[in-house]
Image (spheres, rainbow, N blue to C red):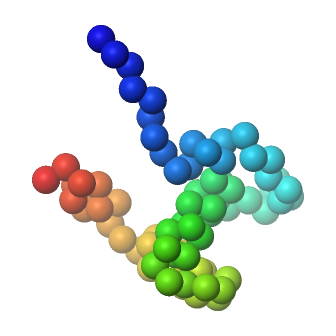
Amino acid sequence: MEEHAILSLSNHFTELSDPRIKRQKLHQLKDILVIAICAMLCGEDNWVEIGRFGKVFAAIDAGQFGASFIQ
């Protein structure tokens, strides 16, 4: 059986070192980067807009979002 590599945007950032102070981390750096990239692809072009996009993205029901890919 042929094995397939898992293609994931967040996998590209797993080796990226995080310069933030450990005690102040609420989210993984790779998650922040993926959300920022998605926001930019949707037309957001500054950090304020990317932040707003991240808050909307966080409000989406994860179960419903995942289910939409398998229907």
x 67%, y 61%: residue: 26
Q: Position of residue 70 (x, y in %)?
A: 19, 49
Q: Position of residue 9 (x, y in %)?
A: 52, 50
Q: Which percent across, then down, holds residue 37?
A: 56, 67
Quadrant assignment, res 57: bottom left
- Vertically, is 15 above or below 10? above
2 is higher (above) or lower (below) than 19:
above
Q: Answer yes or no: is residue 69 visible.
A: yes
At x 62%, y 63%, the residue is 32
The number of discs equals 0
Q: In this view, does 13 lie to the left or right of 4?
A: right
In front of the other: 9 or 65: 9
Percent from the top left, x then y, of residue 45?
61, 85
Picture quadrant where residue 51 is located: bottom right
Q: At x 59% / y 70%, what residue is drawn?
A: 36
Q: Residue furthest left?
A: 71
Q: In which quarter of the image is the N terminus?
A: top left
Residue 63 horizontal side relative to residue 58, left or right: left
Relative depth, front residue between 4 and 55: 4
Q: Which residue is depicted at the point 80% across and 47% down? A: 17
Residue, far top? 1
Residue 55 in sight from this viewpoint: no
Above or below, 7 against 32 in this view is: above
- Relative to 67, 61 lies left or right: right
Relative to residue 39, is residue 2 drawn left or right?
Answer: left
User: In which quarter of the view is residue 67 placed?
Assistant: bottom left
- View extreme (front): residue: 2
